[in-house]
Amino acid sequence: MSKDNNQSTQTPHVTIIGSGVGGICMAMQLERAGIKSYELVEKAHDIGGTWRDNTYPGCACDVPSHFYSYSFEGRSD
């Protein structure tokens, strides 16, 4: 943030490139900080990033997927 000569505070505009886990987390943290002036830019047709784009035949997850969550935003169900 910057201040002009009149000491007024300007709200930054943030552009987040990519809507994977990191991009979504950044948007959530900006919201928590009270910054509403942001945009989330994604080249694909849907959110998800690496988790959406990549599959690994024969690989499996050894942890139930309901354990994956942001530490600051727990699952409500």
Image: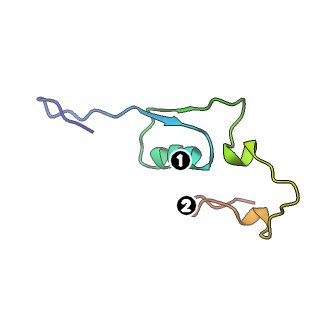
Q: In the rendered image, which quarter is residue 58 located in?
A: bottom right
Q: Nearer the viewer, residue 58 or 74?
A: 58
Secondary structure under tag 1 reads helix
Q: How many marks?
A: 2
Q: How is the image coloured?
A: rainbow
Q: In the rendered image, which quarter is residue 49 located in?
A: top right
Q: Residue at x 63, y 44 (%)?
A: 20
Mark 2 or mark 1, which has the lower sequence index? 1
Q: Which mark is residue 56?
A: none
Which quadrant: the C terminus? bottom right
Which quadrant: the N terminus? top left
Task: Report how far apart the C-alphas of labels 2 and 1 lie in the structure.
Answer: 9 Å
User: Which residue is label 2 attached to?
Assistant: 72
Residue count near mark 1 (Cα–Cα under 10 Å), binned few <14, some 14–19, many ≥20: some
Q: Residue furthest front?
A: 57
Q: Residue furthest left?
A: 5
Type of the residue with mark 1:
Met
Q: Residue at x 69, y 60 (%)?
A: 75
Q: Residue at x 58, y 45 (%)?
A: 24
What is the x, y in percent for residue 16?
50, 37
User: Which residue is label 1 attached to?
Assistant: 28
Residue 4 against residue 65 in the figure, above or below: above
